[in-house]
Amino acid sequence: MRVPHHINILFSPLVLKPHFLDSLHFIVILPNLKFSSQVFGAHHLHQADCPEQTAIMRIPYVSNPPETKTEEHAAIVKRIEERRAPRPLQSLDLALLHSPHVADGWNSFLGAVRTKTSLSDDLRELAISRVAVCNKAWYEWKHHAPLAVKGGVSEAGLEAIKQDTLGERPAELSEKQWAVILFTDEMTRNVQVEDETFDRLREFFNEQEIVEITATVACYNCVSRFLVALDVGERNGTDPEAVTGH
């Protein structure tokens, strides 16, 4: 969630001390505005989440750490925290946790797609990153484009999938990778996939892998549509160039 520019300046002496913020409760009162650390959540008050802009998500995030009313809800939060560790809860989590059971199912599904398939990191992250481009889900791009590079995708390869319209396969991407990208693009934009596109995919992958690729594309279309509809992470109206590093 974005903190308006004037508040960002006010907090600037503290942003380099996240542990201090974790133990601090403070209230800032401005004309007609009242902001509390319990509303923002300490993890939102660091420099990366406080750019100089006033955009905010369409609904407020839950507090961080989230307040829980039952042991069942507390267990849900714990499961999500365990999947995210060592990172803190993300903006997406703090949006989903308005509905704990939806957040729990989401966490289980995403966990399986991200960590329990046989797909290599480069293929999975290429598919996710291409979904982000097709749907202009730049929060999704912010998180997954660096993972594609970490998985072995070159900067030139990433540049190719960052284009709104795919051109010819660049030398930096293999035929196998390109088959995944074309399948992802067609499935995301058209829903229906042409036989030619599917046949190309079958040249490189077995049935299990095809199911996992299809599930990954479907899953992250779900994610991106949720992100964009609510403007989670406040990336709507930007572009991939606005994301640090890519």
Image (cartoon, rainbow, N blue to C red):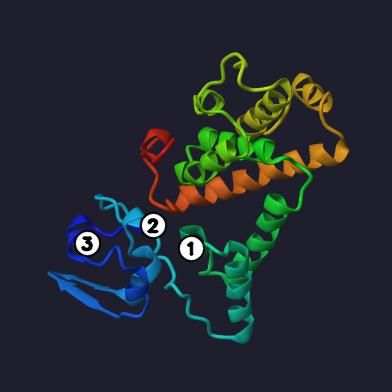
Q: Earlier in the sequence, mark 3 or mark 2?
A: 3
Amino acid, disc 2 = Arg
Q: Which of marks 1 and 2 is nearer the N terminus?
A: 2
Occupied quadrant, residue 171: top right
Q: Nearer the viewer, mark 1 or mark 2?
A: 1
Local SS, label 2: loop
Amino acid, disc 1 = Ala
Q: Earlier in the sequence, mark 3 or mark 1?
A: 3
Frontmost residue, 134 versus 81: 81
**The N terminus - image quarter:** bottom left
Q: Distance between the residues labelled 3 and 2?
A: 25 Å
Which residue is depicted at the point 35% across and 56% down? 49
Given the current orientation, which residue lies at the most extreme right position? Answer: 207
The residue pinned by badge 1 equals 95
* Above or below, comparing residue 2 to residue 70 in the picture: above
Instruction: Evaluate whether residue 227 shows in this view.
Output: yes
Given the current orientation, which residue lies at the most extreme left position? Answer: 31
Amino acid, disc 3 = Ser
The residue pinned by badge 3 equals 12
* Above or below, comparing residue 168 to residue 5 in the picture: above
Q: Report crowding for label 1: few under 14, some 14 to 19, many 20 or more residues within 10 A (C-alpha).
A: many
Occupied quadrant, residue 200: top right
The x, y position of residue 12, in whole percent, is: 22, 62
Q: Report crowding for label 2: few under 14, some 14 to 19, many 20 or more residues within 10 A (C-alpha).
A: few
Given the current orientation, which residue lies at the most extreme top position? Answer: 168
Local SS, label 1: helix
Q: Residue 58 carries which label?
A: 2
